[in-house]
Image (cartoon, helix red, strand yellow):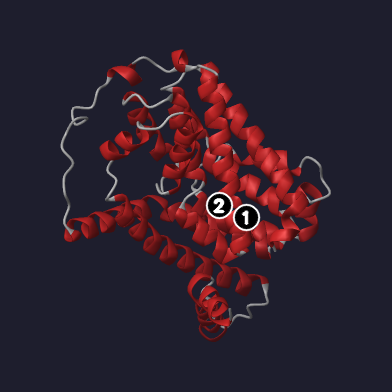
């Protein structure tokens, strides 16, 4: 257990990096890390490097696994199942696709076009930006393994329940016709056998591509987190999002919707909010609102589904996030 604790602290939490950055701030910048400015600089440099390093390594590893499951093969596998089993597999597939909500929509179109049940594709669409293996590791590095595992489980449950409900509602007629009419010319193509070198190159390209798309959001998120952590008084935050406020979870979810970022950019903000006394469920609800219900992704989804289906999706996911948030606020102490 002592060895596991050491590995968790040094590999995931990167305490060695925190100490190294503290030395940098104090001896090079000549600032006390206990001061607002020194603490902000320490928070920013440490969290930014930690998240980018972990994200790069994790996306590379996940992409290598993904190289064994190209889209056509995945469609064939999912097509063998039906009912809730297919929804569970669709949600689990989303956990190994490190995409933001906007990047998940083209795959959603492809799966729907390939004839997969609508509910299964929505289970994938919900879980893909909300939960993935990289977020599990990053959440564990900040909030601990118990919280990270609980978050992943409830995220998958939300994807399965909402996807199943949408599937049982028979809403296929509210999908735009072009989604079904654009048949991929590679649908029946033979699967290509990749060499180990090809898989490594693919993993490298995926890691570089995803990092190039999210690094700005990571830095912005870390910057906001540093400001919250060191400059905004705890009394101000508690007055708006304190655990005693019944509306805090709902407000955090709604505030997150207009933003556009992935889970990696919102983690530092959630970390800072919890450090200021905001309930764990409130912080996670904000994070889930940003990743699963961002305004840009809703605008993109509106182009492929009609208002009734879009409203059903938004309503179910919002309700699920709020329920999860209040549950974490009520029982979050069990995971700390």
Neighbour tally class for label 2: few under 14, some 14-19, many 20 plus, Cα within 10 Å: many
Residue 88, x across and y down, in percent: 49, 39
Q: Quadrant of the C terminus?
A: bottom right
Q: Residue at x 60, y 51 (%)?
A: 151
Element assignment for label 2: helix
Q: How far apart, in angstroms, are the residues tagged by discs 1 and 2?
A: 6 Å
Residue farthest to the bottom, as pictured: 27
Residue 256, x across and y down, in percent: 60, 41
Contact (Cβ within 8 Å) of mark 1 with mark 2:
yes
Front residue of 215 and 163: 163
User: In the visual, does 162 lie left or right of 74?
Assistant: right
Neighbour tally class for label 1: few under 14, some 14-19, many 20 plus, Cα within 10 Å: many
Q: Can residue 226 be seen in this snapshot?
A: no
Q: Residue at x 19, y 60 (%)?
A: 196
Residue 231, x across and y down, in percent: 68, 62
Above/below status of 159 relative to 1: above
Q: Residue at x 54, y 55 (%)?
A: 221
Residue 181, x across and y down, in percent: 29, 17
User: In the visual, does 2 lie left or right of 121?
Assistant: right
Residue farthest to the right, as pictured: 244
Q: Which mark is residue 335?
A: none
Q: Which residue is mark 1?
A: 270
Q: Which mark is residue 266?
A: 2
User: In the visual, does 186 lie left or right of 222?
Assistant: left
Above/below status of 251 relative to 8: above
Q: Can residue 217 be seen in this snapshot?
A: yes
Q: Quadrant of the N terminus?
A: bottom right
Q: Residue at x 45, y 13 (%)?
A: 173
């Amino acid at each position: 257990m002592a060895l596991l604790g050491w590995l968790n602290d040094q590999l995931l939490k990167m305490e060695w990096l925190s100490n190294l950055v503290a030395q940098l701030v104090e001896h090079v910048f000549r600032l006390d890390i206990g001061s607002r400015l020194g603490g902000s600089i320490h928070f920013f440099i440490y969290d930014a490097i930690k998240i980018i390093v972990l994200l790069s390594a994790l996306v590379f590893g996940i992409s290598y696994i993904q190289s064994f499951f190209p889209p056509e093969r995945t469609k064939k596998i999912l097509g063998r199942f039906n009912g809730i089993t297919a929804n569970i597999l669709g949600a689990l597939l989303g956990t190994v696709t490190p995409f933001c909500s906007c990047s998940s929509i083209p795959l959603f179109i492809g799966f729907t076009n390939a004839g997969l049940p609508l509910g299964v594709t929505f289970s994938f669409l919900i879980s893909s930006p909300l939960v993935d293996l990289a977020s599990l590791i990053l959440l564990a590095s900040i909030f601990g393994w118990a919280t990270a595992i609980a978050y992943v489980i409830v995220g998958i449950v939300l994807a399965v329940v909402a996807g199943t409900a949408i599937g049982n509602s028979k809403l296929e007629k509210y999908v735009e016709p072009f989604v079904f009419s654009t048949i991929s010319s590679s649908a029946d193509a033979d699967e290509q056998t990749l060499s180990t070198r090809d898989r490594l190159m693919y993993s490298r390209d995926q890691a570089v591509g995803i990092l190039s798309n999210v690094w700005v959001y990571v830095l912005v998120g870390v910057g906001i987190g540093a400001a919250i952590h060191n400059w905004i008084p705890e009394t101000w935050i508690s007055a708006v999002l304190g655990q005693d406020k019944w509306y805090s979870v709902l407000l955090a979810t709604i505030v997150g919707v207009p933003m556009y970022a992935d889970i990696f950019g919102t983690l530092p903000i959630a970390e800072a909010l919890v450090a200021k006394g905001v309930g764990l469920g409130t912080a996670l609800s904000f994070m889930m609102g940003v990743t699963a219900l961002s305004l840009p992704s809703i605008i993109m989804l509106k182009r492929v589904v009609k208002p009734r289906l879009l409203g059903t999706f938004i309503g179910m996911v919002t309700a699920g996030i709020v329920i999860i948030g209040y549950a974490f606020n009520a029982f979050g102490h069990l995971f700390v």
